Image (tube, grey):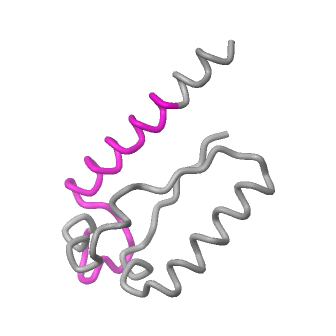
Amino acid sequence: MIVAYIPYLEQLLYPDKFAENLALFRSNCVALQMHCYVPDFVKEPADTLEPLYIGPKAAEGHFSELGSAKFAKFLIGVLHKEMQESDTSS
């Protein structure tokens, strides 16, 4: 199973809380033996991420058109990687 982490903008604005949530996500992935991925854009400065979300301060955490495109590109990369690993293990 492949799981992708989709952070709320508010999480990214509070690095300590985000680090805590990310650690929990990763430990659950290991415990459940899942393939888990975190989008690269979460490493960017939080104040540059607001255009990736919809709404005042991205209250509901939904991606804007730009955010959706970035997340889709991230998912395509994940699926491509998983397919390559699957092909080499067959």
Outermost residue, right side: 31
As drawn, is 63 to the left or to the right of 10? left
**Residue drawn at x 37%, y 56% as measured from the top left:** 40
Question: Hey, which residue is sitting farthest front in the picture?
Answer: 88
| Residue in the picture at 45% in, 28% down | 80
Left or right side of 35 for 32? right
The quarter of the image holding the C terminus is top right
Whether residue 53 sits left or right of residue 10 in the image: it is left
Out of 88 and 50, give the one closest to the viewer: 88
Location of residue 67 in the rendering, given as x and y in whole percent from the top left corner: 27, 57
On whether residue 80 falls in the magenta region, the answer is: yes
Q: Residue at x 38, y 66 (%)?
A: 42
In this rendering, is residue 15 above or below 70?
below
Q: Main secondary structure of the magenta part?
A: helix
Magenta part of the protein: which range?
54-81
Q: Quadrant of the N terminus?
A: top right
Q: Quadrant of residue 85?
A: top right
Residue 60 lies in the magenta stretch: yes
Q: Is residue 54 above or below residue 46?
A: above
Q: Quadrant of residue 25?
A: bottom right
